[in-house]
């Protein structure tokens, strides 16, 4: 029987849920507050240059796993989409020494040994764990039966090092190494605040070809998904924001918007940040216990945000070979001093990111909830002053590491926690949900709000670790639950 289903939020989770529910024969309307869908997976043009604010790599780019099949179903990926496979996930440049996290694990292991022979034992152990994680993730991405789940469990318990990594920060793990370049590289090679398990996880996905870049990035992927939704008969309300959910007898009976629209749904799927849903749309009358517990641990499991500056570089960019993280003189960005800068030149996709011999380059540093509160406390004038200072410090740090770029860099745009918060209502301007730092921080919310029969929740916040893959998978699970 066809049902009238309203999806709140047009990010990846909302779009996937909408498409899968349309395919089950329901009528679906997505309400999105911005002028286009995508949520955090968004893009825009600045002075004719394409800015991708989300995709650095996409999980599920290999055609042999369930995540790829979900992407394919919504046309995010298909046989025509070119997948760009970089040689290195990142190169960490520490005082001139290049520590590469390469796709070829054996080649990378030998390169590390040449740099730090004194760390032979720990280097070999590191790469043995990555290889074990490759096997683990290969099973996990194909895990559909009870037998495969049992096999997955056996793999985990055969590798105590994987279990231990769940309770180790990257900094703690890095202390095992004597070489300062390796210590710095392992501590900082990944953005965000997640632990060693997450590093092994993502690096193994990259090395096996399941974390690569779809040509055209967010812009073209999101447009394909949107067109898929509309082609199936979905209804899309843009520049419209839900303001109130009216509840009678434990059911949402009416949805009100800022354009004085009143919609009467059979079922509601929320893909927005649960805190915004609970606090703003449900007047703090309901809770999702597992997410509340994560919020109470936020200082131990911080949210990951960023301060991201986009520039163009004119002419040759051969001095920066792919994503590169530099150790820099400490600069204060937000709440604390940072001694690293992640630089991502988009010259690997020249059809979209190079124009008039100028390449779009991203400069990135981590931020968290403390930085958000710091920026929030500033006056408008002070915030503008601090923002300009941040931009100048990050660009100057890049030039110090690459003097040949002086005079060839032009600022395009930036965003930080406040800008992210404004666009998506995400808690503290987060890019990802609560960090995975130990076993206690690992959680799965069931996607229901106790006390409301016809409300389902999906998105990155309903599961640790968060991010685009979590948004996709949780929306897939919710769509399967709705009959």
Image (tube, helix red, strand yellow):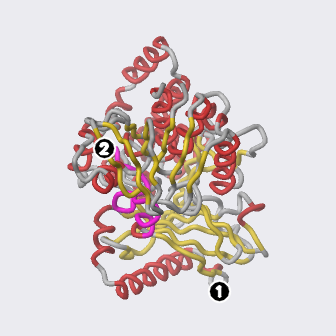
- For residue 86, the mark is none
To which quarter of the image does residue 417 belong? bottom left
Q: Position of residue 222 (x, y in %)?
A: 63, 51
Residues at circles 1 and 2 in contact by the CB criterion of under 8 Å? no
> Viewed as shown, does residue 302 lie left or right of 432?
left
Q: Quadrant of the N terminus?
A: top right
- For residue 247, the mark is 2
To which quarter of the image does residue 109 belong? top right
338 versus 188 height, above or below: below
User: How many labels were placed on the picture?
Assistant: 2
Q: Position of residue 52 (x, y in %)?
A: 61, 61
Q: Is residue 157 magenta?
A: no
Q: Position of residue 406 (x, y in %)?
A: 62, 84
Which residue lies at the image location 58% right of the left edge and 28% below the top edge? 24
Q: Is residue 432 magenta?
A: yes
Mark 2: give few (<14), some (14-19) or many (20+) Cα within 10 Å. few
Which residue lies at the image location 50% right of the left edge and 68% below the top edge? 308
Q: Which residues are magenta?
A: 419-437
Which residue lies at the image location 62% right of the left edge and 38% below the top edge? 71
- For residue 407, the mark is 1
Q: Position of residue 442 (x, y in %)?
A: 31, 37
* Mark nearer the N terminus (1 vs 2): 2
From the image, state whether disc 1 or disc 2 is nearer to you: 2
Q: Nearer the viewer, residue 29 or 443?
A: 29
Q: Could you say whether the residue bearing mark 2 is in a helix, strand or loop?
A: strand
């Amino acid at each position: 029987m066809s049902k009238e289903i309203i999806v709140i939020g047009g990010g990846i989770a909302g779009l996937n849920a909408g498409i899968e529910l349309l395919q089950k024969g329901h009528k679906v309307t997505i309400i999105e507050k911005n002028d286009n869908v995508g949520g955090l997976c968004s893009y825009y043009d600045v002075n004719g240059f394409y800015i991708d604010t989300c995709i650095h790599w996409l999980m599920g780019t290999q055609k042999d796993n369930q995540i790829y099949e979900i992407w394919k179903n919504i046309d995010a990926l298909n046989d025509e989409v070119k997948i760009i496979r970089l040689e290195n996930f990142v190169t960490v440049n520490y005082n001139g020494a290049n520590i590469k996290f390469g796709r070829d694990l054996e080649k990378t292991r030998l390169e590390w040994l040449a740099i730090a022979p004194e760390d032979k034992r720990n280097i070999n152990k590191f790469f043995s764990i990555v290889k074990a994680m490759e096997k683990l993730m290969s099973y996990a991405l194909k895990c559909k039966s009870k037998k495969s789940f049992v096999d997955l469990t056996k793999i985990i318990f055969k590798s105590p090092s994987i279990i231990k990594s769940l309770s180790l920060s990257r900094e703690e793990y890095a202390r095992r190494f004597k070489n300062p370049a390796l210590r710095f590289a392992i501590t900082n090679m990944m953005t965000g605040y997640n632990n060693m398990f997450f590093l092994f996880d993502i690096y193994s996905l990259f090395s096996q070809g399941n974390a690569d870049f779809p040509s055209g990035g967010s812009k073209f992927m999101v447009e394909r998904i949107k067109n898929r939704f509309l082609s199936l008969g979905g209804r899309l309300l843009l520049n419209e924001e839900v303001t109130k959910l009216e509840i009678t007898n434990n059911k949402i009976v009416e949805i009100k918007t800022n354009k004085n629209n009143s919609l009467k749904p059979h079922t509601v799927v929320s893909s927005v940040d649960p805190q915004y849903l609970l606090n703003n749309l449900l007047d703090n009358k309901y809770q999702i216990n597992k997410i509340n517990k994560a919020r109470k641990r936020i200082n131990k499991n911080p949210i990951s945000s960023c301060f991201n500056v986009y520039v163009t570089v004119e002419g040759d960019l051969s001095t920066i070979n792919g994503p590169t993280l530099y150790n820099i003189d400490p600069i204060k960005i937000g709440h604390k001093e940072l001694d690293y800068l992640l630089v991502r030149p988009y010259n690997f996709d020249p059809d979209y990111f190079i124009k008039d011999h100028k390449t779009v380059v991203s400069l990135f540093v981590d931020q968290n909830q403390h930085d958000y509160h710091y920026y929030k406390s500033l006056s408008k004038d002070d915030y503008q002053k601090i923002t300009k200072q941040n931009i100048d410090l990050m660009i100057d740090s890049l030039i110090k590491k690459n003097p040949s770029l002086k005079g060839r860099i032009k600022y395009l745009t930036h965003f930080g926690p406040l800008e992210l918060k404004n666009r998506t209502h995400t808690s503290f301007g987060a890019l990802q949900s609560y960090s995975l730092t130990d076993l206690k921080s690992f959680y799965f919310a069931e996607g229901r709000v106790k006390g409301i029969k016809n409300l389902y929740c999906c998105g990155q916040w309903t599961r640790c670790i968060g991010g685009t893959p979590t948004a996709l998978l949780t929306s897939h699970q919710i769509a399967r639950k709705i009959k």
